[in-house]
Amino acid sequence: MGKIIFYEDKNFQGRNYECSSDCSDLHSYFSRCNSIRVDSGCWMVYEHPNYGGYQYFLSRGEYPEYQRWMGFNDCIRSCRLIPSHSGSYRMRIYEKPEFGGQMMEFTDDCPSVHDRFRHQDIHSCNVMDGYWLFYEQPSYRGRQYFLRPGEYRKFSDWGSISSKTGSFKRIVDFY
């Protein structure tokens, strides 16, 4: 079970909304989001309804202003609770769409895709176990993308507009 509270103003002020499950459209509950408190669980929050736009990973803690979660603005329109996972982690990345080209399997975090894979482009991947975060830049910086178990035949399948991936890491349990 998870619990996240969204506040319209900075420092946990103003109108708020408490959520404990996925919500594809938060617009009717608040008009802007300037602070968030995560009481339990790991969450992805999204800039647009239906889990679109910029994505932000939040673990348990307090985020008194949107810059603290690396937000570009005060617009949060959907959220997803990341299920607890205590098993193994395994993912295959590919240099070409549809699982083509060079492939490499990972079971741990990767702070620099270029250093380990010799490519900075990941065009497709297969997440076999666990939940993962892709980052646009090395050292876990830049835009974030949430990947759950499944096949991603092209980079747009995980929400990216580019095949450039600088790093990725496992979402370990914070419950």
Image (tube, rainbow, N blue to C red):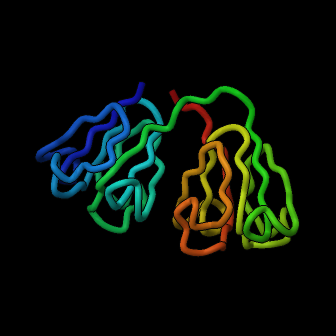
Q: Residue at x 33, y 37 (%)?
A: 4
Rendering coords of residue 151 (x, y %): 68, 51
Q: Is residue 53 left or right of residue 162?
A: left
Rendering coords of residue 80 (x, y %): 42, 43
Using the image as rendered, state which of residue 2 and residue 51 is in the foreground. Answer: 51
In the image, residue 16 sits, relative to residue 98, either above or below, namely: above
Q: Quadrant of residue 115?
A: bottom right
Using the image as rendered, state which of residue 168 and residue 35 is in the foreground. Answer: 168
Q: Is residue 130 left or right of residue 64?
A: right
In the image, residue 130 sits, relative to residue 175, either above or below, namely: below
Rendering coords of residue 164 (x, y %): 66, 73
Q: Quadrant of residue 34?
A: bottom left
In the image, residue 43 sits, relative to residue 49, either above or below, namely: above
Q: Residue at x 22, y 48 (%)?
A: 11
Rendering coords of residue 113 (x, y %): 76, 64
Q: Residue at x 12, y 45 (%)?
A: 15
Q: Residue at x 43, y 61 (%)?
A: 70
Q: Is residue 71 left or right of residue 157?
A: left
For the question of whether residue 106 can be seen, the reply is yes
Q: Is residue 92 left or right of residue 58?
A: right
Using the image as rendered, state which of residue 106 and residue 58 is in the foreground. Answer: 106
Locate the N terminus by quadrant.
top left
